[in-house]
Image (cartoon, rainbow, N blue to C red):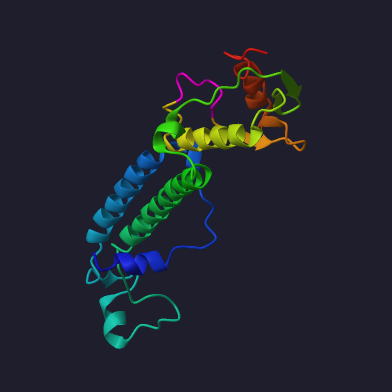
Amino acid sequence: MRLIGFVVLTLSAGCATTVQPEDMSAQSHRAEAARERQLARDHIDKYDPRALTPTPGVSVGDLRSGYDVSIGLVQYNPTHGQLEVAERHLIHAREHEAAAADLESFEATECKNLAPKTRAACPTLGPASQIEDLANGVRIHFPAGTDVDAVVEHMRCHLAFARARGFTTVGDCPLYIKGIEINQAADGAAVDVTGASRRVAGEIQVRTRVGVRP
């Protein structure tokens, strides 16, 4: 177990992450990280620093007479590969921990002014005065006098709430799906709901109109 710190120090800073926050909920990311760390410990336990054996092709006579280390290793440790496998598990664990932290931080930031009960409540879009299709989603217009700031705050908070829970809590709130962004329009009187892909944009255009009274 004492070797975990050593292995962590060998992690490559340039490794590209294979884990995305929206892959699962924050809780699931942390559970996966714990599983990966346990796998790393299992492999570290299989490493034996004393398990040295002569390098293949090196005779006992060579070892006794002093083998030229510039040619090759006199001895090698066949269990060293366990540390390499442990390192990969630790990298994956840290990716999941970073994803969980990202989800939790996003919710804390977006919902700082809203109580937990409000975060879970689906923000209503109706009555909207107009829903305008954009190339990457929709722009939702509201009647004069609507507190659009409050609408955006609640919508962004609910998105963060759903995102942190792997979108498992949005059955009655169909707009909130993976890959959407919610921002106040430049004129301050509308809300832009957009997606990074054409598929998501199309979903937004359909889902935004569910339960809305234009």
Indicate the quadrant containing the N terminus: top left, top right, bottom left or bottom right.
bottom left
Residue 147 image position (x, y, % from top left): 64, 32
Whether the magenta-drawn stretch holds residue 175 is answered as: yes
Residue at (54% x, 27% y) in the render: 177
Residue 53 in which image quadrant: bottom left
Quick one: 81 or 73, which is closer to the camera? Answer: 81
Q: Position of residue 78 (x, y in %)?
A: 29, 63
The residue lying furthest to the front in this view is 145
On the question of residue 46 being in view, the answer is no
Q: Could you tell me residue 140's position as x and y percent?
A: 69, 25
Can residue 31 be seen in the rendering of this structure? Answer: yes
Residue in view at x 51 percent, y 47 percent? 109
Q: Residue at 41% across / 75% down in the picture?
A: 72
Figure disc tally? 0
In the image, residue 69 sits, relative to residue 165, either above or below, namely below
Q: Is residue 171 above or below residue 56?
A: above
Task: Answer with the quarter of the image where residue 145 lies.
Answer: top right
Q: Main secondary structure of the magenta part?
A: loop
The location of residue 134, given as percent across then percent down, is: 75, 25
- The quadrant in which residue 71 appears is bottom left
Measured along the vertical axis of the image, is residue 78 above or below residue 211? below
Which residues, given as a range, are shown in magenta? 170-177
Looking at the figure, which quarter contains the C terminus?
top right
> Residue at coordinates 30% horizontally, 75% vertically from top-left?
59
The answer to whether residue 24 is above or below residue 48 is above
